[in-house]
Amino acid sequence: MSLSLVAALAIAASPAPARPQPFTHHDMISMRRLSNPRVSPDGKQVAYVLRTTDLEANKGRNDLWLVNLDGSGSRQLTSHPDSDSDPTWAPDGKSLFFLSSRGGSSQVWRLPVDGGEPLAVTKLPLDVGSFRLSPDGTRLAVSMDVFPDCASGLECNTQRETERSKRKATGRTYDKLFARHWDSWKDGKRSHVFVVPVAGGTPVDVMKGMDADSPSKPFGGPEEYTFTPDGKSVVFTARDVGRTESWSTDMDLFVAPVDGKARPRKLTDKNRATDTSPVFSPDGKTLAYLAMARPGFEADRYRVILRTWPGGQERVLAEDWDRSAGSLAWSPDSKTLYTAAGHIGQVPLFALDVASGQARQLTKDGTDDSPQPAAGGALVYVHDDLDSPADLHVLNTDGTSKQITQVNQEALARIRFGGFEQFEFPGWNNETVRAYVVKPVDFDPKRQYPLAFLIHGGPQGSFGNHFHYRWNPQVYAGRGYVAVMVDFHGSTGYGQAFTDSITDDWGGKPLEDLQKGLAAALQRYPFISKEKKCALGASYGGYMINWIAGNWPDGFKCLVNHDGILDERMGYFDTEELWFPEWEHKGTPWENPDGYGKHSPINHVAKWKTPMMVVHGGQDFRVVETQGLGTFTALQRKGIPSKLLYFPEENHWVLRPANSIQWHDEVLAWLDQWTRN
């Protein structure tokens, strides 16, 4: 066991010290993580998932918890070495359905909330990836990975797996993309939605024969499908586009009967962009869903579409509201839709009036998610911010809010965070750009502190008021650094035009914003050292680190590049989701070579001189490992001080707790090396 892991275990087990200590990455990794709240049918209780990190097992474990709407009666419902997740209330409110890997495979289980042991509801020969419960509680829609041409049922799938395992030859053949996606090589299977009675019976593939996934891979979940109000059909999301799948964002809604006797019917045939996240109104008269308008663009604004049911007439709700909606939840009277959306460095909740389309902001600072109506007109949601990990809150009808969980109360009692604030400055074209600064924990305005200049990925993303578990600026503040994060042109939450502005200009406006943002921070905050500065970024942020190395070579003492592109042309050919570079660089490399060449870091390697740490994951198929290895090769060949940190089993992110500890140990030591002398 590494010394770092021993230290983390000791922190997790030790009592709170007399005086709170600066926040560290060990604290961050040990934090409990709350997610997936589900309000009971009577609106008086909330079930949720709580993840704890098992450092010995090097993984997270999920359990189900329950709390009353007023914050009383908090209790743990499940405690099992395997994870329990996705709580779903039975219509009578007496039990919870949930997904669990207990028993050796992932299946749906049921637990009485007032006492009793959980019982397996499904005992299928394949793992259940996600599930939804029908309105009357008699049927389940479950997703499973199957071979689409196995028309004879699940037995065909298990038989084919057995036959494949006996083969001595290991080669696979492909006749179309995706050959691999995110962090997995394709094996011929698709995620299909099946319907099975809760009482038991033969599961029915409502997508039989479709060479498409629902939920979508790799991040789709149960939010991408739902039962119709009468329970007789399922509406699901799928990208059924044949060989164009790797360069198409055309996801559609389909409807299929639960008995599987009719082929799925496409509901959104007119839109060639993304349609997803169907949610029916409580009165059963309206289907709401999210839709983008521009084919091929993954960061287009999500509009809210209302479709009369079963009639089919559609309209855009709140067309003039220049924000991208998140998950949707209906009010009990079917007159309001609740959602969260990025908004000027925050992610507040909004209420969308169904009749008028008026958008009303409900909360202010921080990051809010998963809004759900509760008893007495209240709204339950998850809230976090830069110095508070996620907890459940309740918004009352008078506009006041109350925190009803404190899942990290003991841990937070021994921790101190750095103070933070948002500031703005004139960026590219003198347009307003916003940024955050997080001060060191032991802040003294008379001192000078080194700078950790964090650059977000996406590029259509944001380093907003959010408690992050991979790129948390408080880790740097706890180490004695000032952290600054600029939401440059291309960031989300400032209107779609601001987001669009980065297209075909990866190295232009954003670099100017970063340069002007740093200058503004140095002028505004005299406690930031003008000499001891390091820049860090991942994904697009990693690309920007490579771009900075050749186009701002005197800006920083050191750089950290995590999963960043070196060669934009080759980056097209070795990635998987081709719609992304084709939109960002306006075509393919053979159609628009200048689009890939003008902002490619590889063309500026001759000017590199800043020490750089390069981090890459061996299972990263979004930005492949050779991009990181190529960056390290260039640095070493030029004699620039450099270090490579390579994780063979990690993807585009670093997810394993021990690897996250090592990542922070190495990165913080690199910053210290170049700023502490």
Image: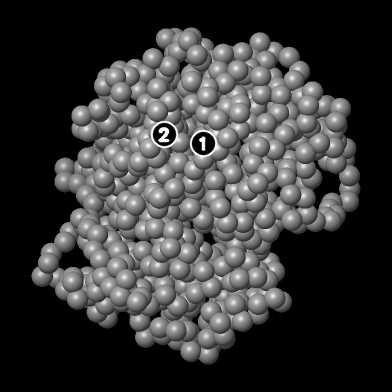
For the question of whether residue 663 can be seen, the reply is yes
User: What residue is disc 1 on?
Assistant: 306
Which mark identifies residue 354? 2
- The front one of 60 and 331 is 331
Whether 95 is drawn above or below 544: the answer is above
Image location of residue 120, percent across then percent down: 61, 17
Image location of residue 615, percent across then percent down: 51, 66
Whether 199 is drawn above or below 478: the answer is above
Circle 1 — which element? strand
Classify 10 Å Cα crowding around label 1: few (below 14), some (14-19), many (20 and above): many
Q: CA distance from mark 1 to mark 2?
A: 9 Å
Image location of residue 263, percent across then percent down: 78, 31
- The front one of 30 and 398 is 398
Amino acid beneath label 2: Val
Left or right: residue 316 versus residue 216 is: left
The answer to whether the residues at label 1 and label 2 have Cβ atoms under 8 Å apart is yes
Question: In the image, what residue occupies the spot 16% across and 42% down?
Answer: 18
Question: In the image, what residue occupies the spot 48% across and 20% down?
Answer: 283
Whether 245 is drawn above or below 75: the answer is below
Circle 2 — which element? loop
For the question of whether residue 223 can be seen, the reply is no
